[in-house]
Each structure stands twice: as C-alpha cells, then as structure tokens.
Amino acid sequence: MNILSQARRTLGQTDPNFGAPLDTTKGTILYVEGISVSFDGFRALNNLNLYINEGELRCIIGPNGAGKTTMMDVITGKTKPDSGSVFFGQQINLLELSEHQIARGGIGRKFQKPTIFEALSVYENLELATAADKRVWWTLTQQLNSAQKYRIDEVLLQIGLAEHRYKNAGSLSHGQKQWLEIGMLLMQNPRVLLVDEPVAGMTGEETEKTAELLLSLAGDHSVIVVEHDMKFVRSIARKVTVLHQGSVLTEGTMDQVQNDPKVIEVYLGE
Amino acid sequence: MLTQRLLLSDRGGMIVLGLVLLAMVLVPICNILVPETSSLHVSTFMVTLLGKFLCYALLALAVDLIWGYCGILSLGHGAFFALGGYAMGMYLMRQIGPRGQYGDPLLPDFMVFLNWKELPWYWQGFDMFWFAMLMVIVIPGLLAFVFGWLAFRSRVTGVYFSIITQALTYALLLAFFRNEMGFGGNNGLTDFKDILGFPIAANGTRISLFLASGFMLIIAYVACRYIVTSRMGKIIVSIRDAESRTRFCGYKVESYKLWLFVFSAILAGIAGALYVPQVGIINPGEFSPLNSIELVVWVATGGRGTLFGAIVGAFTVNYGKTIFTSYSPETWLFALGALFVIVTLILPKGLVGLFNRNKKTPSKPAEPTPVTSETTTTAKESV
C-alpha cells in the first residue's frame, strides 16, 4: 500500500510536471520480473525478465511471435500480465497504473505504425504532447508558455522537422511521421522511450537519420528499440536482448548474440 | 483576440449566425408591424415553425460537437432532447392548475383520470420555473454522465456505442409509454395554458420563445467554438483520429469523452425545453429511435465537423421535410433515406463542403507564429 500511495503521489493528479525524483539509485530504471501473459491459452510471455539501465540504448530482437509487442503493452499498461512485476525505478509499480498515468510518469511509446494526429499541424502535434496539466478542465483555457514553446523548437530541430512546423502532419512522408512521433515522445520529457520498429518502411537515408537520432537520445533517456532490421540493429546496438517464445533467450553485444548457437538455431532452424 | 478566435476566423459561422440574427430582427417586425394583408407578413405559424427549427439546429449542434469533432456517434441524442422537453412539460403542466378538465388544483388531468390521490414525489418542485430549468440541465446531464461513465470506462466505442445509445432511447420510449411512470403515458403532456404567466398561444409569447431559441443557439454556438478552438478542441480531434496515441500522450481519454458527452446532452436538453412550449406537446414519440437517426442525417447533410454545418443541415432538411410532407407525406422516409445515401456517396463533407470545395483551405497555424528564425537559431546553438 505504501508503494501505491507513493506512486499516486509521484504520478498522480496533483503534480502536473512530474518533476518528482525517480529512485534509480541502483542504476536500473526498469525492472521487468517474471512476467507471464496468456491469450486464450497461448503464452505470449513466459516468465520474462528484463532490466534496463538508466541512459542505456537496448535493442530487442526476436522472431515473429516472440512477445516483443506484448512486452511493450505490459510496460505501458495496455495489457495486464497474469503474473510478475514491473517496476519503474525502485518505487513505482507500473502494474497499478493506467496508460495515461504511465505516459505522464515518463514512459513514452512509439507504435509500430506511425500514429500521429493527421488533422493537426506538426507544431500542434508537439503542442498536444507537451508535458503539462492534462486534466480536462485545464486544457480548456491552457496556452503554451514560453518555456514550452522553446522546448517545441528544440524538439523540432532535433527531429529535423523545423521547416515543416506548420505543415499538416497528414501530408508528411512516412519517415517524417516516424520522427514526428518520436518528437511527440520527447515532448513528454520521458525517462524511458519504447520504440517499436522505427525504421520499417524507411529509405536507406531515412534509416541512417533515425539511427543518429536514437543514438543522440540515449544517455539522456533510456531507449528500448524493437526492430527486425538486423543491419539497423547492428548500426546502433550496444547491448542486444533476444526474445524467443516469450522469454529472454540471450543477452549481449551484437557479435556475441550473432555467434550464439541458440540464436542461430532459433533464427535459421525454423 | 478572443473574438478573433471564436468568430472572425470562422467565416461560415459568421454568415450563419448573421442570418440567424437577421431573422431574429426581421421575423418579429414582419409579424407584428406588417399588416396581415401585406405579402411581407410573417404568420404566427411561421414564427413557431422557425422557432422549432432553431431548436433543431441547437440539437444538431450538440450532435456535431461529439460526432464531428470527437467521433462519438450517438444514435440516442433524441433521448436527452426529450428529457429536457419533459422537464419543461412538467412545469407547464403544473402551471395549468385548476384550469384542467377535472379542475383539480394540484393534480394534472391524467393523474386524476388514473385515480391518483397525490402528486408523485418527482413532480414536486416543478411548479417553480427556476427548478424546472435546473432539471432541464441536470436530468439529461446526469443521465449522460452515468451512461457515458459506464460506456467510456469500459472503452465501448464506434458502432457498439451507437447501438447502446439507440437501445437507451428505445428503453426510455417504452418506459415513458407506461401510465405507471406518471408522465402521461401514451398521450404525454399537453394542453398547456401559460408560461411564466403569459398565455402560451399568444403572439407575443410565440415571438419571445422564438427569440429565446435564437439567443440560446447563438450562445451555444459560441460556447462550442470556444471548446473546439481551445487546446481541449485539439485533444478531442486527436481522440477522434488516434485514440491510443492520445492516451499514450498522457491524456485520460475517457474523461474527455465523458465531459464532452455530458455537455452535448445538456445542449440537447435545453433544445428540448425550448421546443416543447412552441409545439405545445411532449409525448414518448420524441424518444423514438427514428428521431435520433434523423438528427444524425441533418448533421451529415449540413457537414459534420463544422459547427455551422450542423445548423445549415438542420434548417435545410427540416424545411425540406415541411415542404415534402405537405405534398406527399408517405414518401418522406424514402426521401430521407435517399438523402443519407446521396450525402454519403457524393457529399461526404455535406452541403457546407460544396462551398468550400473550390476554395483551398489555408492550413494556417492556430497559434500565432511567435518564433522567428532568430529564436530558432538561438535554440539551435543551445542544443
């Protein structure tokens, strides 16, 4: 109960800025322990354990159905697991919070298919994602303050869409939409970024820019990238986790992982 | 700055509101001052008809706000309209007093007829105008709150939501048909005598009700504009277009939908309350699911997602209905069906879309551009 009230205080409705300190004294920001999820008898996740360090860039790979997306669903509160625990820092139990609370608390998620607000301009997309009081009545009168405007400009430069700020988001190219979505995550000042297949459908040049962007984000944020494109993973990966049938098969550098006989069997044996 | 945001930047809305205001000035003049023999004379029947249309327009506005902007298709908004109407009807019934057929000083005629001895508890207080008006807001609002809270919390969306709203209005229809409910059963509430002491059929009262409907429509329009041009307006559009993204941006989507739904239901209730004294009757037929569907057709015809489009749609379809039903009443439903098909196939943006088709809509920023290239460079340097 103590943890719950702590979490309420940290993520709850009272503090809009969530500047509350996140306890990461042990260097680990995300603890995923013993998670199991079943859908109609199918075990999507099976006793999954995963620890993400602060500021780390982690790539997660694995064949189709390995449970990558389900894992993200569990961390962001979309799916409740059958068993196990997920802690954000030492104190905050994510399983007790709902999606919007987790998002406000500092875990941003990018979907596989770019999902942005197509009817609004690039600027407005970022405006809506800005960390601010997001309760209904406040948004009726809220305006951006200068610090927030400044932050939007910063992010626009970071994601390379500064010239397109007033363009309709729906008219952006596929790659630009992906960057905009990453920008929207950044506006929430997240501690952890979950990025699902960021380069699917991108051109070579766009892929390179995305790699640069993600590398620049690591350090300030913990970044978890789920990706199929091995070449891309190799270009950004420091540490790679391989998922297979809902649990971790192995972890290590890209070279270690690629030479692991278990991994070779999973990927080539099928 | 606020007028700029609410009105000046919205040309179609300005035109429509201008026409409503013009009608509010000209109609009373042409009714009272122009002699009946003149061709410019507007009959009292016409005044009431236009007043009715204004109520419909207000109802359409309420539906457009949730459907056009937030993607919540309610096929039961007629229920909130009827509830507001019943609250007003109860006040008007209490005003009859001893002038009813049976002459009972307290009980409305239908209760005497049913051999009821005393006024049911839920009829208490409705002899006071302020209380009845409060109930016009509270009852539809409360129903919308409870219903919406249950539905949105369970994440009922899309067509499922439409179906249960349809069921809601149908359930209320059946309930209000029952005599035991104490709302006059099949016949509803009628035979009203006066409102706030003024005889209800008098010319002056009719004109006042017409003007009140016009004012209410304008106030509601400005309020809706305020919502859709605020940040909340952008959020509800985002919910319409990408609900889960909005949720993962940290917004509690359910709360937004709920409050918008409640607000919309209140507008519908007010429309119903203004409607009843003008038509002189409220009966369970107003809960009919068909009414709610027709109302969605008005909005679709006018052009959803533009507030003034809903008003245009309510006027054109209802004017068409008035003309049509006086020539060939049996075919009106076919015409209505055909209209829906035509609008869906040919005019997805409604009548309003026709005007905008040739003009390119400049996607000008809602925020004034505060950032010049200078500040952008400083931002770059600091990064």
Image (cartoon, rainbow, N blue to C red):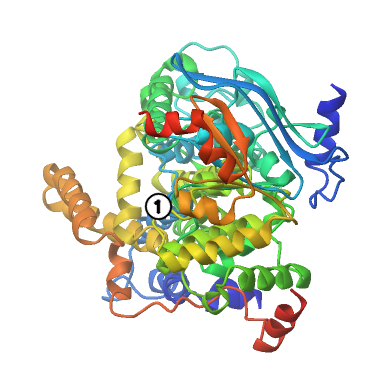
The spot of residue B293 in percent (x, y) is: 32, 41
Q: Quadrant of residue B19?
A: bottom left
Comparing A155 with B27, the one in front is A155
Q: Report whether residue B215 is seen.
A: no
Q: Residues within 10 Å of mark 1 (few under 14, many from 20)?
A: many
Chain under numbered label 1:
B
Image check: B301 left or right of B326? right
Relative to B337, is B183 above or below?
A: above
In which quadrant of the rendered image does the C terminus of chain A lie? top left
Relative to B321, is A91 above or below?
A: above
Q: Quadrant of residue A252?
A: top right
- Residue at x-position 49% and y-position 46%: A227
Amino acid under disc 1: Tyr
Relative to A9, is B219 above or below?
A: below
Q: Report whether residue A7 is seen.
A: yes
The spot of residue A119 in percent (x, y) is: 45, 62
In which quadrant of the rendered image does the N terminus of chain A lie? top right
- Mark 1 lies on a secondary structure that is helix
The spot of residue A45 in percent (x, y) is: 54, 23
The image shows a total of numbered marks equal to 1
Comparing B332 with B182, the one in front is B332
Work out which residue is located at the far bottom of the displayed protein and give it.
B374
Image check: A154 left or right of B266? right
Comparing B164 with B255, the one in front is B255
Image check: B75 left or right of B245? left
The spot of residue B115 in percent (x, y) is: 49, 11
Q: Which residue is mark 1?
A: B56
